[in-house]
Image (spheres, rainbow, N blue to C red):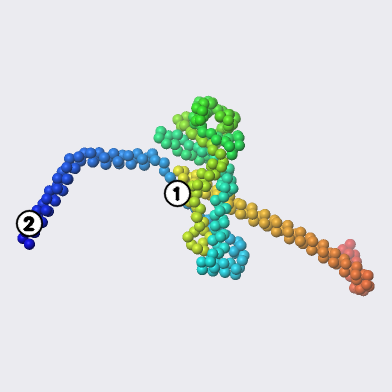
């Protein structure tokens, strides 16, 4: 036991000496460690300052399944079978509506309504900043087929209320007036002023025009539409990641508005069709009843079944009322 204690103390002393030597060895380069930390912090600050920020925009809607609401007791049976794991109309209905919401037809209407195939941005020293159409001092209006128009231009405002347009593909520069059609490459475009926005000579604007289908694909790839986690919920969740939060809000709100408008139009068409069907059936029934009355009258007349005394009394009463009115 006496021999083991000196050995253990000797090992502890050697370990302490090794750690001290290691610390002193690296402490000699403390300036490089400080420089590396400062350099890393500087790079992080620059990255956070100039990196493109992204925003996650969300929305919720509550679907209304009128078919289930009108089914009465059958709707309760459907919910019971769904809760027991046998599937049900709720999940199928929500899935169908999500397919409608993610359809190209609805997104194409959104792109058309807000001209999302035309992308505006201001050029900075390091990166560009995207702008909404309403925030631009002027607008580019393609005059050709929106399904095939594709161009990229740089715009600078010059003295005399004119624009210097640089085609980024060919490098050709053109002086353009407002409200006059010019040709850029194989495309014809028109520049119009946006009232309430001032043009600044110090800013360069970059405008990119892509075909409608490209814009539709881009929007659909950035939108996620998912059902609620609750089994019996009719809530649908929307989420969209974008570098411009106002644009994401515009797209989601517009998509929901167009979806609701389509539902209203479908209901109106169904109501009109039902009303027309009922009116036509009523006309047919009225004709059938009128024909039946005439046949009954003819039959009574032919078989002397008319009560002359009653008919005479009714005639005299009507004549008396007419005389009073006269």
Point 58% across, 29% down: residue: 183
Q: Indicate which disc, 1 or 2, sits on the residue closer to the N terminus.
A: 2
Quadrant of the rendered structure where residue 123 is? top left
Q: Position of residue 73 (x, y in %)?
A: 60, 70
Q: Position of residue 74 (x, y in %)?
A: 60, 68
Does residue 135 show up?
A: no
Whether 242 is drawn above or below 8: the answer is: above
Which residue is the site of mark 2?
A: 6
Point 57% across, 50% down: residue: 103
Q: Residues within 10 Å of mark 2 (few under 14, many from 20)?
A: few
Point 53% across, 42% down: residue: 215
Q: Number of marks in the image?
A: 2
Q: Image quadrant for the C terminus? A: bottom right
User: Which secondary structure lies at badge 1?
Assistant: strand
In-front residue for pair 196/281: 281
Which residue is the site of mark 1?
A: 56
């Amino acid at each position: 036991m006496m021999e083991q204690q000196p050995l253990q103390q000797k090992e502890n002393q050697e370990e302490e000496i090794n750690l001290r030597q290691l610390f002193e060895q690296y402490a000699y380069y403390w300036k490089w460690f400080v420089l590396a930390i400062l350099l890393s912090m500087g790079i992080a600050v620059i990255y956070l300052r100039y990196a493109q920020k992204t925003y996650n925009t969300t929305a919720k809607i509550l679907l209304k399944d009128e078919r289930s609401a009108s089914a009465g007791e059958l709707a309760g049976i459907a919910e019971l079978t769904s809760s027991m794991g046998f599937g049900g109309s709720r999940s199928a209905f929500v899935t169908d509506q999500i397919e409608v919401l993610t359809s190209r037809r609805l997104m194409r209407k959104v792109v058309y309504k807000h001209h999302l195939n035309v992308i505006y941005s201001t050029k900075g020293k390091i990166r560009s900043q995207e702008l909404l159409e309403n925030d631009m001092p002027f607008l580019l209006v393609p005059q050709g087929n929106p399904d095939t128009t594709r161009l990229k231009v740089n715009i600078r405002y010059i003295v005399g209320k004119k624009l210097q347009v640089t085609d980024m593909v060919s490098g050709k520069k053109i002086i353009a007036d407002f409200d006059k059609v010019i040709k850029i490459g194989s495309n014809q475009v028109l520049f119009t002023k946006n009232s309430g926005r001032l043009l600044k000579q110090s800013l360069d604007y970059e405008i990119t025009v892509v075909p409608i289908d490209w814009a539709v694909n881009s929007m659909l790839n950035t939108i996620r539409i998912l059902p609620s986690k609750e089994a019996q919920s009719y809530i649908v969740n929307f989420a969209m990641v974008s570098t411009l939060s106002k644009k994401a809000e515009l797209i989601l709100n517009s998509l929901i508005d167009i979806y609701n408008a389509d539902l209203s139009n479908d209901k109106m068409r169904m109501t009109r069709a039902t009303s027309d069907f009922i009116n036509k059936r009523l006309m047919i029934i009225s004709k059938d009843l009128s024909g039946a009355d005439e046949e009954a009258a003819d039959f009574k007349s032919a078989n002397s079944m008319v009560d002359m005394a009653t008919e005479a009394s009714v005639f005299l009463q009507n004549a008396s009322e007419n005389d009073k009115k006269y």
